[in-house]
Image (cartoon, rainbow, N blue to C red):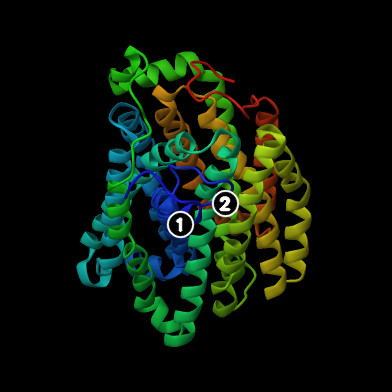
Amino acid sequence: MTATATTSDTIGPPAHPALERKAVAAVVLGNALEFYDFTLYAFFAVPIGAAFFPSGNATDSLLASLALFGIGYVMRPVGGVLIGAFADRAGRKPAMLITIALMAVGMLMLALTPGTATLGGWAQGIVIAGRLIQGLALGGEVGPSTAYLLEAAPAEHRGFVASWQIASQGCAALFAGLIASALTLAVGEAAMAEWGWRVMFLLGIGVVPVGLVIRSHLPETAGEAQDPAASHSTGAVVVRLVREHGRLLLLTFLVIAASTVSNAIGTNMPVYARATLGLTETVSTAVPIALGLASIAFPLLGGWLADRFGRRPVLIWPRVLILVLAVPAFWWLARAPTAPAVYAVTFLLSALSSVNAAAIIVAIPESLPRTVRSAGLSIVYAFSVSIFGGSTNYVVNKLIALSGDTLAPAYYLAAFSVVGTIAALLMPETRGHDLDADSEA
């Protein structure tokens, strides 16, 4: 593949020579695979718990499964530090090849490991190791891939181009929902609980070889080191980030935390619909479709708005709307637990969160110098997602179990939206910012 594309081969508004359709697809594939796995795990948390953590108490089995889901987040900060800094030293492309290969290994270990009934405690050990490997990869994925999109995009459309990173998550969620629903109808709920969920993970892994081939032919965008710090050790890069950009890192940590909680509440909706509202498996299997539909179009809208009006308005106003609407939406859902109500609430909250996320994914790396851009985004994203992405599903289900209050997810979401809104108000505006500048916007 060459770095030059015709207008018909490019993606998004106006053509840019470094952005072929398949190049953008290859770059965002890792993020899409993360959300595919994220959606599937939340969706199949019950049968995964039954396979690896069997218990006479269904709630205990579910909570153990969600704890396994959270284990992978332990390694995300490590991946963010190591792979993010590696991408600033060695280039975006080699880092992206490492992350997608490790993702495939982690997902294979979960999909192919026999249950505890067959392997005993070894089964739990293998899947825990697989989640740790995958967490390492996912922690280092977002920094190099987002930096690549920004550096390859025309300045006036960086928001829109970067928003494909978020839109790819919606595509993955939609694909997961459609295929899971079709497979459930084809083989039945019992078969899905027994072995169908493994098939779903294997289908996602099938795209990895294509992503590896295309990513290996991408042109590099990292450029030459612009100061001696670019060749320093990983520790030196982290020290420099904290010393020179500590305030920005703290604000972005809080902004990403609010966004992460929103995403986790959305992906938990199938479990919420089934375990809390008592709806059927068929209804809950279709919830990711609503999640996916909102998460495809609205990130692109958010990216366009961020290019048109600036990053800060898109960081602030969708988060304010989530704050205002979260509790009323869940109150209505709890009192009208029907399929249309579940789909409507899921779509609404996902749409607002997706618009907001598009501004987040472009504003943070735009604020950082090229020589620490990948590391900065990787580290703050990994730490925030590790803490809140890995815990939210467990926490909200535990809160429901302890309190009996079906509005617990709404209160949790509203609380984080307050924090996210305040942090967004303090973020700098980065539209039109020079990507080679040495300081924050």
Q: Which quadrant would residue 198 be assigned to in this image? A: bottom left
Q: Label 2 crowding class (10 Å Cα cut-off): few <14, some 14-19, many 20+? A: many
Is residue 116 visible to us here?
A: yes
Is residue 124 visible to us here?
A: no
Q: Residue at horizontal 78%, vertical 63%?
A: 332
Q: Which label number is shown at residue 371?
A: none
- Number of numbered markers: 2
SS class of the residue under badge 1? helix
Residue 9 is situated, as x and y percent measured from the top left of the image, at 46, 55
Kind of residue indicated by mark 2: Asn
Q: Residue at horizontal 37%, vertical 48%?
A: 72
Judge whether 176 appears above or below 248 on screen: below
Residue matched to label 1:
38
| 266 left or right, relative to 176 | right
Kind of residue indicated by mark 1: Phe
Residue 254 is situated, as x and y percent measured from the top left of the image, at 58, 33
Residue matched to label 2:
263
Label 1 or label 2, whichever comes before in sequence order: 1
Judge whether 86 appears above or below 178 on screen: above
